[in-house]
Amino acid sequence: PPAIDFQDLVLLDKDASLRLVRALTEVGAVQITNVPKFGQARNRALENLATCLEADKANPVIPIITMADGSIRMSTGGATRKGLMEPMSHSCGEAAASLRSAITTATNQMFLAIDSVSATSSKRPLMSPHYADWIDLVRSGEHLEHLHSYSSAPLPHSAFELSPSALTPQSPLALDFHVDSGLLIAMTTGYYVNFPSNQVNGLF
């Protein structure tokens, strides 16, 4: 997706704001780059997530799902309502507070930039009487935040455990292409542990 520098959004740079609106209109996605300390926050949130969830996988608050390719997904999540960050559903997600804050900051700045362009446009979105502008809409909403840990399918302990269904071809994708019901998805790339990221595996 097209890239917009976070600093340009902070400065409400007109050219960057117009490129942002164009990217969201024509492509539907945009990268916000150079968010301060984002890499550190991402690493802190994700580097121990898999081992933490695995250690407590018997806990019923951790949803465990088998994906289309046989991999296992474990998750923790929380919500932000009217700008207030609520605790994650499991303590494994507590290290994500800085990451959640960084993503919220970048998202809010993105919508402030969109509003700066909308304020001078004759095509302002009609949001009254409920919302004054995009940032009002975003700050008033409920945001659901999830951290997922994926692991490859466990190997059978012996050949006797193989069933006919285990021999059928599996989907090359863990999750089929789909559209979520949210108005906007802000996300970060995967964090790999003992498994290299390449074009065969990863986020498409």
Image (tube, grey):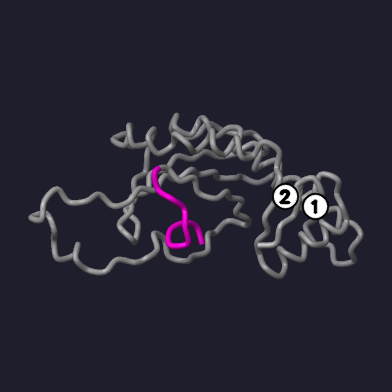
Work out how far the residue at label 1 is from the one at label 2, CA to CA, in angstroms: 6 Å
Q: Dot 1 surroundings within 10 Å: few (below 14), some, or many (20 or more)?
A: many
| Residue 179: in magenta span | no
Q: Dot 2 surroundings within 10 Å: few (below 14), some, or many (20 or more)?
A: some
Q: Which residue is mark 1?
A: 133
The mark found on residue 98 in the picture is none
What's the residue at 32%, 53% (across, down)?
A: 66
Q: Which residue is mark 2?
A: 137
Residue 50 picture location, percent across and down: 40, 39
Residue 44 picture location, percent across and down: 54, 33
Quadrant location of residue 85?
Answer: top right
Q: Residue furthest left?
A: 160
Q: Main secondary structure of the magenta part?
A: loop
Position of 31 relative to 104 (above/below) = below
Looking at the rendered structure, the kind of residue marked 2 is: Leu
Quadrant location of residue 20?
Answer: bottom right
User: Relative to 22, is 155 on the left or the right?
Assistant: left
What's the residue at 77%, 57% (across, down)?
A: 127
User: Relative to 200, is 15 on the left or the right?
Assistant: right
Q: How many marks?
A: 2
Residue 106 picture location, percent across and down: 70, 44
Looking at the rendered structure, the kind of residue marked 1 is: Asp
Q: Which residues are magenta?
A: 194-204
Position of 114 relative to 94 (above/below) = below
Q: Nearer the viewer, residue 17 or 85?
A: 17
Q: Contact, CB < 8 Å: mark 1 with mark 2?
A: yes
Q: Nearer the viewer, residue 158 or 179?
A: 158
User: Relative to 162, is 67 on the left or the right?
Assistant: right
Look at the image and tell me in which quarter the N terminus lies.
Answer: bottom right
Q: Nearer the viewer, residue 129 or 50?
A: 50
Residue 126 picture location, percent across and down: 80, 61
